[in-house]
Amino acid sequence: MNRQKKKSTNGFRWERKHLLGIAELSTEELALLLDQAENFREVMDRPIPKVPALRGKTIVNLFCEPSTRTRTSFELAAKRLSADTLSIATSSSSFIKGESLKDTARNIEAMQIDMLIIRHSTPGAPKFLSECIKASVVNAGDGSHEHPTQALLDVFTIRRKLKKIVGLNVSIVGDIAHSRVAKSNIFALKKLGAEVTVCGPKTMMPSGIESLGVKVTYDLKEALKGADAVNVLRIQAERQNQTFFPGIREYARMFGITKEKLNKYAKKEILLLHPGPINRGVELSQDAADGEFSVILDQVTNGVAVRMAVLFLLSGIK
Ligand code: CP
């Protein structure tokens, strides 16, 4: 067993082999991840944005759901750490011949890989694989359960812009019930000391969400008032088997964020986040998505540094 553990400035050591969710992480682990991401964010601004940290390691992306940002970001992160990396498209894999997820993962592992990054529509699929294979497993989004690296890049972006997380008011607006991004963000923000408000249609608000320590409102004005950052979610149509609101126009009128609403109800320094992909004209207007409050493309840039940190820290234990 290679015990090349990574240490924070206060002496805390990284011990974890898999990243399956934010719920299981301690505050110290979150802080170490964010600090490590800061180091890699600085590497990204160098003329040659590459370090040899993971030379000789092999990292495979197995995405069983569509992705633009997360898959590209993990692949770039691995390349910038000098790992060998490849992505498997499910459309051209043996899944379509009926091979099980477990068999696919075990066959990929037999080629002597070090890490498997998995996106899957089934909650718990990454945890299941972590119990079947010896390689490190990273959850790149599992159904409506968690999307840990999205939450890490969201809090990293807020921390970089506002220099802290403790005591901030962060609102999460939209389809809370079906969103893995909402859950992972709530866990990360609460552990790091932020106040979190969730806002959306009643039909998209899971019952008992208050038990996570969040405030609930169905009024967008209230969610925007006093918020330091607002994270806007996409309606997860692919995870809904019924209609949860009367229509897209009605949703946009009630919960869509526009520049006008931000100017009218929000602090003038509010940060506007969105995990992407955006439904323009639904949850965000053009002028909000591309306006002065938006840090959406910063999130994407920062995502590479955050994923470099995740891969680097997980590589410490085999
Ligand atoms: N935010 C996010 O997960 O985007 P992708 O679906 O494009 O990876």
Image: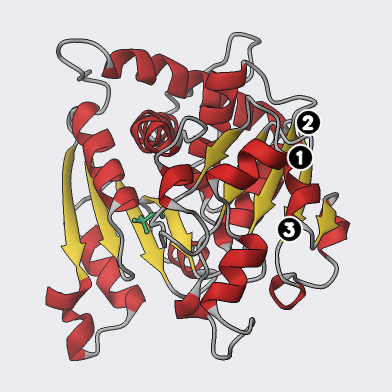
Provide the secondary structure element on which disc 3 rests.
Answer: strand
Q: Residues within 10 Å of mark 3 (few under 14, many from 20)?
A: many
Quadrant location of residue 50?
top left
User: Of the numbered discs in the image, which one, if any, rests on residue 193?
Assistant: 2
Measure the alpha-carbon separation of dots 2 and 1: 5 Å
Q: Is residue 211 left or right of residue 127?
A: right
Q: Residues within 10 Å of mark 1 (few under 14, many from 20)?
A: some
Amino acid marked by disc 3: Cys
Amino acid marked by disc 1: Lys
**Residue 251, position as x, y percentages in the image:** 60, 71
Quadrant where ligand 1 appears: bottom left
**Residue 301, position as x, y percentages in the image:** 34, 32
Query: Residue at label 3?
Result: 199
Q: At x 31% / y 82%, what residue is drawn?
A: 100
Mark 2–mark 1 CB contact (< 8 Å): yes
Q: Is residue 210 left or right of residue 124?
A: right
Query: Residue at label 1?
Result: 190
- The image shows a total of numbered marks equal to 3
**Residue 83, position as x, y percentages in the image:** 20, 34
**Colour setup of the view:** secondary structure
| Mark in the foreground, 1 or 3 | 3
Residue 14 visible in the displayed image = no
User: Of the numbered discs in the image, which one, if any, rests on residue 296?
Assistant: none
Along the viewing direction, whichever of 49 and 309 lies nearer the viewer: 49
Mark closer to the chain start, 2 or 3 = 2
Quadrant location of residue 164?
top right
| Mark in the foreground, 2 or 3 | 3
Q: At x 44% / y 36%, what residue is drawn?
A: 291
Provide the secondary structure element on which disc 2 rests.
Answer: loop
